[in-house]
Amino acid sequence: MELTVTDLSIARGGLPVLTGVSLRLGPGRALVLRGPNGIGKTTLLRTIAGLQPPLSGSIGLPPEDIAYAGHADGIKPTLSVTENLRFWARIFGTGDIAPALGAMDLVALAERPAQSLSAGQKRRLGLARLLVTGRRFWLLDEPTVSLDVASVALFAGAVRAHLAQGGAALMATHIDLGIAEAEVLDLTAFRAASAAPAPGGFDEAFA
Ligand SMILES: Nc1ncnc2c1ncn2[C@@H]1O[C@H](COP(=O)(O)OP(=O)(O)OP(=O)(O)O)[C@@H](O)[C@H]1O
């Protein structure tokens, strides 16, 4: 099965943001969304995830085949790391959480209440959630925020393993994850005519 996006136009806050976006994402593939702040990466991911309707165009993949990780980690603060992952495994109807704990280096933190984790540790838990969803299409919005270099490498390894198992990943990220096989789609060319203008340079902003 393939994710297909055809001639999609999308809006945020009632204003058109991007227009005419088409892409395809098949099993084993990763696609990185690029573009300046405010171009519409988050809005595009939210639309593909089914969280908001497009203005026009079509998305060929039911939301039930998608795992979305947005800016919020979706963590239950009073539950432990293990309890959080068991909660999500139950929601998604999957079982063993041990591989997810191991993949995101959470074994030593397994019994800690999530609210006591550092920002990067919380992010690792949020990403471990992806591994217990059993979903093939990962939509990831700035997944590496708060992660140190070692954790970025762990995460990149988890994405690669997911691709090797026939999964796919569509992600907005400003950093290079070192996933050589990932393709890049720059959204700048799809800016809607009535969208907010591109940010100016340093001189313009501070003159
Ligand atoms: N809640 C909101 N209400 C109204 N407009 C919004 C809202 N969130 C974002 N926008 C606007 O929608 C446009 C697209 O924002 P979006 O968050 O999709 O961009 P982005 O490419 O993900 O940006 P960044 O790289 O900064 O994360 C921007 O012009 C932004 O100001």
Image (tube, rainbow, N blue to C red):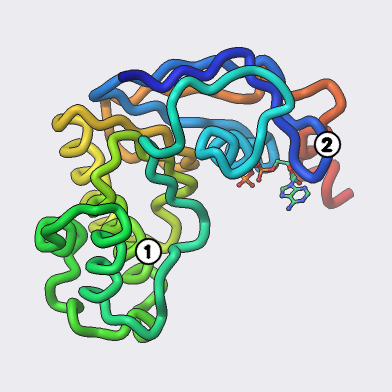
Ligand 1 has an atom within 8 Å of the beta carbon of the residue at disc 1: no
* Residue pointed to by mark 2: 15
> Could you tell me residue 182's position as x and y percent?
33, 26
Q: Is residue 185 left or right of 177 when viewed as pictured? A: right
Q: Classify 10 Å Cα crowding around label 2: few (below 14), some (14-19), many (20 and above).
A: few
Q: Is residue 195 left or right of 54 when viewed as pictured? A: right
Q: Is residue 120 left or right of 43 when viewed as pictured? A: left
* Residue pointed to by mark 1: 123
Front one among 26 and 108: 26
Dividing the picture into quadrants, the one containing residue 38 is top right
Residue in the image at 53% along x and 33% along y: 48
Dividing the picture into quadrants, the one containing residue 80 is bottom left
Distance between mark 1 and mark 2 Cα atoms: 31 Å
The three-letter amino acid code for the residue at tag 2 is: Leu
Q: The N terminus is located in which quarter?
A: top left
Q: Is residue 166 visible?
A: yes
Q: Is residue 176 visible?
A: no
Q: Secondary structure at mark 1?
A: helix
Q: Is residue 76 left or right of 43 when viewed as pictured? A: left
Q: Nearer the viewer, mark 1 or mark 2?
A: 2
Ligand 1 has an atom within 8 Å of the beta carbon of the residue at disc 2: yes
Q: Classify 10 Å Cα crowding around label 1: few (below 14), some (14-19), many (20 and above).
A: many
Rendered position, 44 above or below 144? above
Residue in the image at 57% along x and 14% along y: 6
